[in-house]
Amino acid sequence: MNQSKHSHAYDLDEILHEIRHYLPSQAPLKDFVHHNTLHAFQHLPFHQALKQANSQFGFKGYLSIAEYQTLYREKKIKGEILQQVVQNHFGENEANHWAVKILDSPAIQQTYPKVGSFRAHWKVDYHINLDKSIHPFLFRLLAAYLDQGISIWSFPVESTGFLDAIRQINQASYSSIFKGKRAKKLIANPKLNLTQLLEILVGREEAYGWYLFDQQFAHPGWSGMVSVLEDQPSSLLDRRPIKFEDLLIFECLLEIDALDQKFGENWIPIGVRFPHETSQLFETSLIEEQDLILQCFQEAYEWSYYDEVLAGISHVKPVAESKEIPSFQAMFCIDDRECSMRRYLEFIAPTCATFGTPGFFSVEFYFQPEFGKFHTKVCPAPVFPKYLIKETASHKKLQKDVHFNQNSHSLVRGWVSAQTIGFWSALNLVKNIFSPSSSALEVSSFKHMDPNGSLTIEHKGEFEGELQIGFKIEEMADRIESLLRSIGLISGFSPLVYLIGHGASSINNTHYAGYDCGACCGRPGSVNARVAAHMANDSRVREILASRGIEIPVSAQFVGALHDTTKDEIEYYDLEVLSEANLRSHHKNVGLFAEALDANSMERSRRFATLSKAQSVGSIHAAVKKRAFSLFEPRPEYNHATNSLCIVSRKSTIKGLFLDRRAFLNSYDYRKDPAGKALTKILGAAAPVCGGINLEYYFSRMDNDHLGAGTKLPHNVVGLIGVANGADGDLRTGLPYQMVEIHDPIRLMLIVEHFPEVVMEVFLANPATYEWVKNYWVHFVVIEPVTKQFLHYKDGEFVNYKPLSSIDHIDHLQDKLKDEAGNMPVYLIDSI
Amino acid sequence: MELTFFIQLMIGIPLVGFVLSLIIPESRENLLSKVAFYTAGLNLISILVLLVLWAVEGFGAVNVKEFVLYRNPNFEFLIDFFFDRVGAVYVTVGALLTFLITFYSRYYLHREPGYKRFFNTVLFFYLGFNITVLAGNFETLFIGWEVLGISSFLLIAFYRNNYLPTRNAIRVFSIYRIGDVGMILAMWASHHLWHENVTFHKLGNAELVHEHLLGHSGIGLFISLMLLLAAAAKSAQFPFSSWLPRAMEGPTPSSAIFYGSLSVHLGVFLLLRTFPFWENQIGVRIIIGLIGLTTAVLSTMIARVQTSVKTQIGYASLTQIGIMFIEVALGLETLVLIHFAGNAFLRTYQLLVSPSIVSYLIREQFYGFEPKLKSVKTGLASRLIISCYIWSLKEWNLDLLMNRLVFRPLKNLGHRLDFLTYKTVLLYFIPTYVLGLSLLVAGIKIPDSVRVYLPVIFGFVALMMVLKAFSERGSARLSWILLILNHFWMVLAIAENELFAWPQVAIYLSGVIFFGISGLLIIDWLKRLTGQHGLHHYKGYVTKYPLVAFLFLLSALGLMGFPLSPTFLGEDLLFSHIHEDQFLLAGIAALTFVMEGIVTIRIFARLFMGATVDREISSLSSDDLALSKKNQFIKRPLAAKANSY
């Protein structure tokens, strides 16, 4: 926080704005999208931000010293790397001295965070526990107001906002929300504002901001939710207008009421007894010795892995480019889960070529399925498309499950249910536990779209609201061109080009949206793949493309498909448009894909400790599939849990490297983009999307209590918008423990193959992207294409980096995989 | 008889399983879950065999006289089992659900810290459940009842380093303990009514019951009401309802099986079990029906406004249990049994699939959303609707009610003794105790007019000790010592009442002394080690000293008279010396017993549970807070080259 900005007196609007900026910005469950948990600190350099977050809010951004020391003993932090990091920090002379200090460092004393320490005086000096008496009721009321369909009786008044609703209830009921006279009188006043209340509670203007920070960060989950809903009201299908300020006013009223109950109306405002200055909250926290120790450990931990990766890349032997056209080409999402899939496919079908590109395939739109009453966004979250694509399908039955019927909760019908459905539940329970199968309860990526339905891809002059239904031919060509240019595929098309989106399947999983494609806003990429393939197959589009220098032969056809990353299955779309020859080779390819899927599921299974590895590949794959609909399986798949790299390069640069599903791979050919135009787009998406995913995992892993959602086992779904622990808890944000437990918390390393000057130009022209790199929220390395040198971004320039690690070569990857459950080093492989 | 053998197996298998699970080290995840799985599985199989054998024998009620734990001329503690169709249904549903849940949890809890603890507690719970539903008399049932109470506490507080689970576990335990008053007093009164420890088998004999109740309708009514109190607390009936949603703090499967299905239905079980006893007391039946009705109506309303899945299912289940109370009151045993089984399965399943509700209902909403047409009504109707809504949202203030009626008055009473400190306690109460004791031992004749009051006075002193321990926050040691003293005063009170033999005193006090001292040692050790032993906030030492925490838990259990220490038996003995007309003394003794449990478990919780690193600022003292803030703002010397990177 910039100090000078806060030297003047605060007005409340400014304070509110600040609080909202710092609150978790996680949308309701169905719209879950990964983002940098500490986005509010992103204007600061990474380590300074972590320090600031720690002293302000008590968030932990590092492992404990003991954990780092264990990693050092296990050689996951390498001695020579630590040495190098320390040298870079303190210079050669002091390096040894510091290295000793770091390795022998005692555990770090946690200091109390600033936020929370002001309001604590209520409990400590007034002996009143406001949180205990207010929170449960406040949460209940908020949940009741925002509820999307759990409660049977809906909120009883129609209102223009939360406070208005409270006011109406206060007027029109025998039961009152407040107990004391003063609070009742205050709420009745239509001109009631926050300042009035803070005057009573705090009594000192300079302290208002601090007080509100304390108050709201006592329940960041609910506050964050309200703040998000104020900005994105459309996240609630059943609209509920709510303003953040309303929450503050209501909570202050509850506090005044509780205090009045205990002390009568005469008590000294907390700010008068305990003066505080809001500006102190934002003072820059100075880096201390112990912070430097943590920094060095963390960087050594990160570079111990990065160094291996770079060493691996330097060992890749350049292959002479073959002029032959590949047997087929397949585009996958850049998602780290496709990293191994592509590796297997290339080994099983050596003549094919694979590409990685963000899984919305450059077509951005809203999708409305048949019978759907709403439309959902299927492109990266920050993009706001102007297009709508509707599905028409003959029939798509909504599967029902009687156990979610609310009749069972009522008195008389519940009495009937208990004695009828009850016994049906017993059977279901036995069945679901001993032989799990697909049911209405599961979320399946393949159910996102009806493969036999048709889509309104082409614009026929219709609009819905502001949205244009379908794309014009010209618009289609723009998108396909951008797709092909970004991956450098502008000539040499194979007869079959697959566009393979991805999605996930799970059951009993409240965070299901986080498992689907991030580039499709937490939805499966099936519609996008199908739409993009349709566009690319359109002859009119191809004409325009040809005029722009991309010649796609008539024989080449595009096929949309969806890869379910949980079950490792692929569904192909619109095969009827294929020519006979292509259909034949497609059938052959399906077999190759299936083989790759088997191998992929096998590689994934090494992470699943409860799954027996001593069985055939087929049985392992079957067991992996079963996880998608096993009620008792909290880890249907590990999602992005191993992500740590993002490589923007040609495939040949990293061919034959085993990267252990840890890399986002974006295909990019610097030769076809000398000015870095495509690179700008790629980095503009990769930094926030991959970086966001990476940092959400990072912080959820580092401080699972505050920045993550804790263990998911006791989670309780609230209002269909969030999860809480038990009955009275605050909403939990971030990722549950089960999603991040195997994650190595290191920042993302972005590796780009291009000339450093071009990259720097791209940075300078795009401050938003540059902020990620400049402040070290991602590490950045350039591969100089000619000299093959690595250039590491540091303090505004690129510095040469020479990897120290040696890389092993292994012959039989799968043997190695079978008995290793943890993260594996980088290997050179030439067979599976 | 084979039946007897199989009934014994029902207790034996979980017991063996539980003990095995205690021995297996934490790291053997697989073995642990296997033990639990096979325990429940074997039990399920033996039940099926038992059912077949039982059918062959013609579904008759079976009584198994196990063994006599203690006997003196006018008191006998008998372990006894009983099997009839009520027991059969409960034991079968229990075995089936536990079997399924152990299989489920084997994967669900994989890699969860506390995997072993979870299965230990589940097996312990299951053991208690089987003892309870197969018990043949009140004493045996009470053993199971106590096991259920403590294992519930441990399951709710499974996430023992978090504040809410710990607090709610204590809350639930406290309500359970209030129910225990009912059990104890019912046992006491029935002992006097029957002049023996009556078996449930005998209760089934209508003539016999009728004969005994003749001329004792007052005591009959008292027993029935006390049983109802116990049943209502265990089944979360009005006015105890609000504990149920708060019990949903543990991992979902444990909430599902215990608070969705098995545990909450035990109140119904107790009523079914004792039905023959109060069958002919119309007044009691009406009260039971009314309590059930009130619960059903209130909780269905509360269920309707719940916005979280688990609490909604909890209240929906409660609604049905309320109806079961009505059905029991009407004497519809078969219907109740069907209703119980169906409800138990339904709620277990609903809770297990509860996380799926997000995607399911969102999908339903996505495809079938219709904005609700709200008719804006004015006037009385709308006023009532809104009021009901808000009242339901506040759970009809049941929580507040319990607090105002029970806990706050007790705490206030305790605060009257705030002047007591560690030293003054030693100074005042030990000499007076010695005086009282020497009066007794020396056999000095005290005028009868004074003597009559002595037991009540001493009993009251004992009660005050406990209440002071309840409100004491400054020192764990003082609180603990008061608890020990309370037992001594109680013994003195009873000894003044009716000379009871020294061996009996020895039985009672041996447990108190042993566990009291071991607890005291631990508290002292902790104080020396950490320098603090106040009870102002949760300290979470279990993470640092798990073994000590376990030992202290044992001490706490022993001191509160859990069926592990001889004090459990002693307490029963003690009650047998309270005359049937001494309701006040019995009341004081029962209340003391209840509070004793609550206070001990709270000391345990405050010392060993809660956040590891207590980052909650508000737990600091005023000076600490000021200091910590000062530290925050003093600029410490810059480390070399800070911000260089």
Image (tube, rainbow, N blue to C red):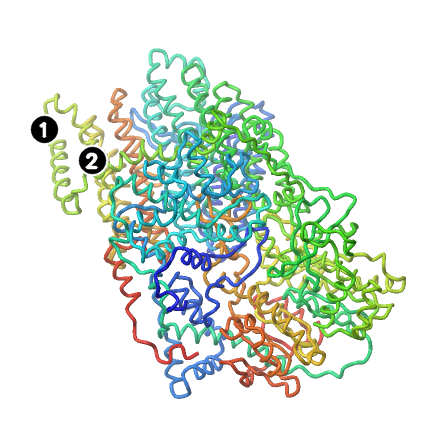
Whether B393 is drawn above or below A318: the answer is above
Task: Tell me what residue is drawn at x 21 percent, y 36 percent.
Answer: B464
Asked if marks 2 and 1 touch (Cβ < 8 Å), the reply is no
Q: Chain of mark 2?
A: B
How far apart are the alpha carbons under marks 2 and 1? 18 Å
For label 1, the SS is loop
Q: Which comes before the other along the chain, label 2 or label 1? A: 1
Q: Residue flagged by tag 2: what amino acid is it?
A: Trp
User: Mark 2 and mark 1, same subunit?
Assistant: yes
Pick the front one: A237 or A288: A237
Whether A618 is drawn above or below A548: the answer is above
**Viewer-nearest of labels 2 and 1?**
2
Image position of B563 (left or right of B472): right
Q: Check disc 2 and report the residue beneath it.
A: B489
Q: Quadrant of residue B240?
A: top left
Q: Check disc 1 and report the residue beneath it.
A: B444
Number of numbered callouts drawn: 2
Q: Position of residue A790 (x, y in %)?
A: 59, 83
Residue density around tag 1, few if under 14, some if 14–19, many if 20 or more, within 10 Å: few
Task: Tell me what residue is drawn at x 29 percent, y 59 percent.
Answer: A276
Image position of B276 (left or right of B637): right
Residue density around tag 2, few if under 14, some if 14–19, many if 20 or more, within 10 Å: many
